[in-house]
Image (cartoon, helix red, strand yellow):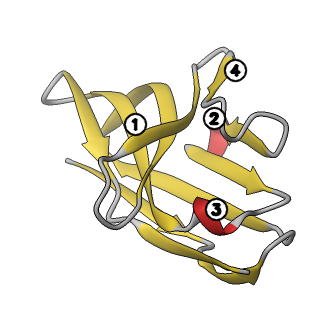
Amino acid sequence: QVQLVESGGGLVQAGGSLRLSCAASGSIFSINAMGWYRQAPGKQRELVATITSSSTTNYADSVKGRFTISRDNAKSTVYLQMNSLKPEDTAVYYCNADVTTFYSGHNNYWGQGTQVTVSS
């Protein structure tokens, strides 16, 4: 089994910064794409950013130029640096990973979510 544990959420004023981390652990053979998604109250979960195993990145238009996704393959960890935060960035942020395990093959996993609140 694989676990994704997020950290780094919190309350910040508009214009501020936060850095989210997500560490994967378990019976991991390899981690393919990793990403961050978010869900605001009353809205559907949406993609924020993804990063492949070769560090190719993709961003939602709403966060381009403000957020940066990165990963440390040695630590099985993905990061999301969030700058110039806006109140509309307020949401629960979820980590996602596409993982090949030793025992159960290829699966997709989600973290438990971390709350980000941006005050105006």
Task: Point out the frontmost of discs 1 and 3.
Answer: 3
Q: Position of residue 16 (x, y in %)?
A: 85, 72
Disc 1: CA contacts within 10 A as few (<14), some (14-19) or many (>=20) = many
Q: Which residue is mark 4?
A: 55
- Quadrant including the C terminus: bottom right
Q: Which residue is mark 1?
A: 97
Q: Residues within 10 Å of mark 4 (few under 14, many from 20)?
A: some
Q: Does dot 2 land on a helix, a strand or a loop?
A: helix
Residue 103's x, y, as percent? 15, 30
Mark nearest the camera among 2 and 1 is: 1
| Chain-order first, disc 1 or disc 4 | 4
Which residue position is annotated with label 3? Answer: 20
Q: Is residue 106 above or below residue 78?
A: above
SS of the residue under disc 4:
loop
For marks 2 and 1, the one nearer the N-term is 2
Residue 43: image x %, image y %? Answer: 32, 54
Label located before the other in sequence (2 or 3)? 3
Q: Is residue 51 left or right of residue 93?
A: right
Q: Is residue 29 left or right of residue 32?
A: left
